Image (tube, rainbow, N blue to C red):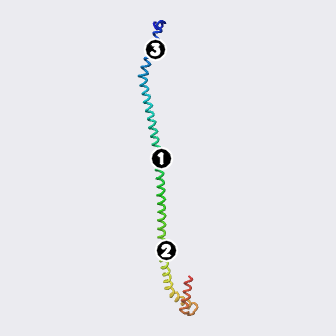
Amino acid sequence: MPQLDIASYSSQIFWLVITFGLLYILISKHLLSDVGSLLRQRQDRIQSDLDKAEEFKNQAKDLKEKYESTVMQSREKSRELINRAIFDAEDSAARKNRELEVVLTEKLAVADKKIKKAEQDAFAAFTPVATDLSKQIVKKLVGLDIKEKSANEVVIKFLKGA
């Protein structure tokens, strides 16, 4: 076997170094540069994606803050509108109650006047009849003939007390 011949070791080592040197140069220049550029491209794409993700994260954070701010403003505005509507409704109800109270007071005063007039008319219509009846009762029971004026005064006192 020629590889084991000690006399050819130096030439084998020489060609081994040259072959491995050329192979190293060939691999490092062509293959490793392609792999290196692929790794650099990949790293650049990963970094670009990370930068975009960070940018999107910041945009999402800003949008969330705007959304929350808008929601808070909307809630405040709706509270204001509700409070204003409640105040307006209470004010309107109070105004209507006052108007109704005035109308009812007027109607009550008119009804009071009508009742008093009806009462006076009833007393005026009832007084002569009661006077005549009381005169007749006293005459039949006691046998006395009393005057119209006296009977009328008694009847009026009695009706006022009743």
- Callout 2 amino acid: Thr
Quarter of the image where one finds residue 156: bottom right
Q: Nearer the viewer, residue 151 or 114?
A: 114
Please tell me the numbered disc located at residue 65. 1
- Callout 1 amino acid: Glu
Please tell me the numbered disc located at residue 17. 3
Please tell me the numbered disc located at residue 89. none
Whether pointer 1 and pointer 2 mark residues with C-beta atoms closer than 8 Å, the reply is: no
- Across and down, in percent, residue 86 comes to 48, 61
User: For the view shown, which residue lies furthest in the right direction?
Assistant: 142
Q: Which residue is identified by label 2?
A: 105
- Callout 3 amino acid: Val
Q: Nearer the viewer, residue 139 or 22?
A: 22
| Residue 13, above or below 105 | above
Q: Nearer the viewer, mark 3 or mark 2?
A: 3
Whether pointer 3 and pointer 2 mark residues with C-beta atoms closer than 8 Å, the reply is: no
